[in-house]
Image (spheres, rainbow, N blue to C red):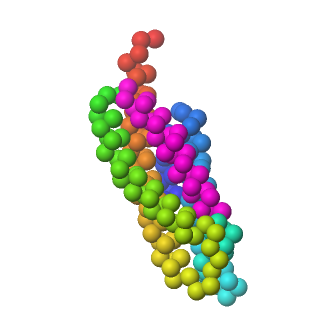
Amino acid sequence: MLKQLDNAKNKWGGHHSLIDRWLDDRQQLLVNFCGMFNQDDGYNLQTLPDDRSLTNFCQQLVDYISLGHFEVYESLVVNSTEGGDSNLTLARSLYPEISQTTDIAIAFNDKHSNMKYVDEYDILGKDLSAIGEALATRIELEDQLIDAFHKSIQNTAVSSPS
């Protein structure tokens, strides 16, 4: 996922401040997600994240999802419509799939954001795996939206008289 993020930043970074901010937020979310698995229990065994790390991740997750839904997607769709009906059709087809990943993320947050663990490690491990898969899917879908937006900007710049 992190390699895919680097590709996205190299391809689209610097063209739109909102997308740059969003990609930066995405990067931090993924770094923290991966970092939760790099904890060591002193015996070189990988452990699940502590309560604080998980709560921080949940907050970042909700912030990232909110930024996407309430600011970025709208901007991408509005600006992509300048690229023609195909961009609007793409946005409309991707949005329900992105919404499914939102539902998974919100359910994860609701379940784990302020949880104190006793014997919940099996559940948490499965839920972390599911949220990781949902984030990977979401990123692929979001990248398709960003690509359509970026292409519409390029097409508009090429077709505009100087």
Residue 49 at x, y percent in the picture? 63, 74
Say whether residue 132 is visible: no
**Image position, residue 96 (x, y; %):** 35, 50
* Left or right relative to 131: residue 35: right
Residue 120 vertical position relative to residue 23 in the rendered view, above or below = below
Is 66 in the magenta?
A: yes
Residue 17, relative to residue 46: is it above or below?
A: above
Q: Residue at 42%, 12% (x, y): give it.
A: 161
Please tell me whether residue 44 is drawn above or below residue 19 in the rendered image: below
State which region is magenta. Answer: 56-82
Q: Which of 106 and 54 lies nearest the eye of the viewer?
A: 106
Q: Find residue 38 and report its image quarter.
A: bottom right
Picture quarter containing residue 20? top right
Q: Residue at x 37, y 18 (%)?
A: 159
Establish if 86 lies above or below 110: above
On the question of residue 114 being in view, the answer is yes
**65 and 137: which is toward the camera:** 65
Q: Is residue 1 magenta?
A: no
Q: Main secondary structure of the magenta part?
A: helix
In this view of the protein, which residue sits in the foreground, 89 or 115? Answer: 115
* Drawn side of residue 21 relative to residue 90, left or right: right
- What residue appears at the point 67 percent right and 88 percent down from the top-left corner? 43
Q: Residue furthest top?
A: 162
Position of residue 12 measured from the top left corner of the image (x, y, whole percent): 49, 39
Q: Position of residue 3 (x, y in %)?
A: 50, 56
